[in-house]
Image: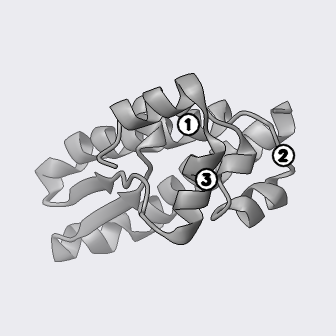
Amino acid sequence: MSPEVFKELLHMNVVSPQAMSKEAMLHLRKAQGNVVFISSIAGVYGILTKVYVFIIKGFYFHLLGLSVGETLGGYCASKAALTHLAKAMALEEAPNGVRVNVISPGAIITDMFHTAVEAMTGQKMRYFLQYSNY
């Protein structure tokens, strides 16, 4: 993954959510509101796979300039950063009455998911099954 693509991932998955939250924070404090970030299980465990497995997000990765067969370490890192941003913001904003949470969904069982799983073999499959409820 090129440094430019990695920077774009960080911008989309960390910088933009943080900036939006900052803009809304005065209102959220007055309303005792909530911030909910959407991360990924990839930010918790990491994933041993390449772009071709992620059919459902193929267009997303194509827009970023990632090619078929490219690993997703940068994606995992950006989602981990978002998760930790949420934890830090939760501690910072708790005294102000603002709750900050993060949701880290895993795989969603669809036909596309089954196709992706079928593309995995050997060690990748064992690792995937170890960290999933599939």
**Element on which disc 2 rests:** loop
Which of these two is toward me, 20 or 119?
119
Q: In x, y percent, where is residue 99?
A: 19, 58
Q: Nearer the viewer, residue 80 or 132?
A: 132
Q: Is residue 78 visible?
A: yes
Tell me the residue at 83%/31% (across/down).
3
Picture quadrant where residue 61 is located: bottom right
Residue at x-position 45% and y-position 27%: 127
Query: From the viewer's perspective, is residue 98 above or below residue 79?
Result: below
Could you tell which of marks 3 and 1 lies nearer the N-terminus? Answer: 1
Amino acid at circle 3: Ala
Reading the image, the residue beneath label 1 is 76
- Determine whether the residue tagged by mark 1 lies in a helix, strand or loop: helix
Quadrant showing the N terminus? top right
- Name the residue type under label 1: Cys
Q: Which residue is mark 3?
A: 116
Contact between labelled residues 2 and 3, with CB atoms less than 8 Å apart: no
x then y, percent, for residue 70:
79, 36
Give the residue pinned by disc 2: 68
